[in-house]
Amino acid sequence: MTQYWLMKSEPDEYGWDDLTRDGETKWSGVRNFAAAKNMRAMEKGDLAFFYHSRTGLAVVGIMEITRSHYPDPSADNDKFVLVDVRPVKALVRPVPLQEIKANPKLSDMALVKQSRLSVSPVSAAQWVEIIAMAEK
DNA sequence: GCCAACGTTGGC
DNA sequence: GCCAACGTTGGC
């Protein structure tokens, strides 16, 4: 069963355009236990939204997890992991945080409830809802 | 750029 | 093991 996720990055640091240019990237730099736990739960083939934080504030694209978690060589212990991701496609229209917050169907999203969590789970219903919003 | 929220660290 | 201090994130 495919699981769904949402992963944040600041577009100034590493944005959707960088990912599409690279074709694939290692999702690194996560130093938060809750986020790392979510990364450990990811499986190859899972899908994830790419969210632009700070200066973008919108869900912009869809990624696929191409490699499940493995140790982060830049971490000084084994608590933190990496996954590999590739871009699947950009959303027809980016879905802004404002609209997500305004949508009662999405009020339970970790993105809304726990804004600082950089890697969070998305339910199938939430996933479908955001795709629908992008196609409006 | 500011600051609130919250996760982590470290002294006790 | 608790909790105050500190650091980081991310919306505004």
Image (spheres, coloured by chain):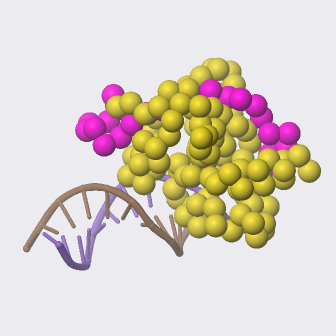
Chain colours: A yellow, B brown, C purple
* Residue A10 shown left or right of residue A106 in the figure: left
Up/down of A118 relative to A115, above or below: above
Image-quadrant location for residue A78 = top left
The N terminus of chain A appears in which quarter of the rendering? top right
Magenta span contains residue A46:
no
Residue at 51% across, 56% down: A117
* Residue B7 shown left or right of residue A62 in the figure: left
Magenta span contains residue A78:
yes
Image-quadrant location for residue B7 = bottom left
- The image position of residue A25, as x and y in percent, is 55, 25
Residue A136 seen from this side: yes
Residue at 61% across, 40% down: A2
Residue at 92% across, 50% down: A136
Residue at 35% across, 31% down: A71
**Main SS class of the magenta portion in the image:** strand
- The image position of residue A103, as x and y in percent, is 78, 66
Task: State which region is magenta.
Answer: A72-95
Q: Residue furthest front?
A: A1
* Residue A120 shown left or right of residue A16 in the figure: left
The one of A87 and A11 positioned closer to us in this rendering: A87
Q: Residue furthest right?
A: A136
- The image position of residue A12, as x and y in percent, is 62, 39
- The image position of residue C12, as x and y in percent, is 69, 67
Residue A96 seen from this side: no
Image-quadrant location for residue A108 = bottom right
The one of A92 and C10 positioned closer to us in this rendering: A92
Up/down of A130 relative to A62, above or below: below
